[in-house]
Image (cartoon, rainbow, N blue to C red):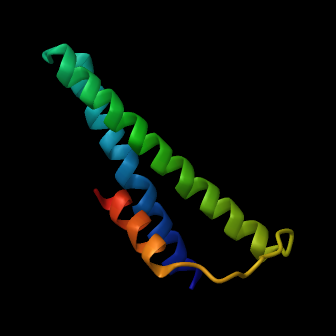
Amino acid sequence: LKNDLLSTISHELKTPVASIRVLVDTLLAGDQSPERAREYLELIGHENRRLDRLVQSFLSFGRIQREQLGLRLQPTSLSGVVERAIQELG
């Protein structure tokens, strides 16, 4: 299970890191219009926030495993979860 977890985590972390790297390299090439450069900067910001959420989730998982973080289970809207997932993929 640990191997599967590490494999999944490394894959999930590589995706936003690779996206950020490509966008930064493209911006450094300097061939973009100001509008395109702004679009790339917004994408970098989005990927950075995604990376932060992944890291925070991983750290929370570690705290749960060490029983330092209690969970408060509560009912939630499935449609809200689906909407957030769609936003992440969009």
Above or below, comparing residue 73 to residue 46 in the picture: below
Depth order, front residue of 49/6: 49
Q: Is residue 42 left or right of residue 60?
A: left
User: Where is residue 22 drawn, in percent x and y?
Assistant: 26, 36
Total count of labels: 0
Depth order, front residue of 24/86: 86
Above or below, comparing residue 33 to residue 78 in the picture: above
Q: Residue at x 59, y 54 (%)?
A: 55
User: Where is residue 82 drawn, in percent x and y?
Assistant: 40, 73
Q: Which quarter of the rendered picture does the C terminus lie within?
A: bottom left
Query: Looking at the image, which residue sits at the far right?
Result: 68
Q: Which quarter of the rendered picture does the N terminus lie within?
A: bottom right
Q: Find residue 32 and report its image quarter.
A: top left
User: Where is residue 89 drawn, in percent x and y?
Assistant: 31, 60
Q: Residue at x 42, y 61 (%)?
A: 12
Q: Find residue 57 and report its image quarter.
A: bottom right
Q: Residue at x 52, y 78 (%)?
A: 77
Depth order, front residue of 22/71: 71
Above or below, comparing residue 32 to residue 90 in the picture: above
User: Where is residue 34 drawn, in percent x and y?
Assistant: 20, 14
Q: Is residue 42 left or right of residue 63?
A: left
Q: Residue at x 33, y 45 (%)?
A: 18
Q: Is residue 78 left or right of residue 56?
A: left
Q: Find residue 27 and report its image quarter.
A: top left
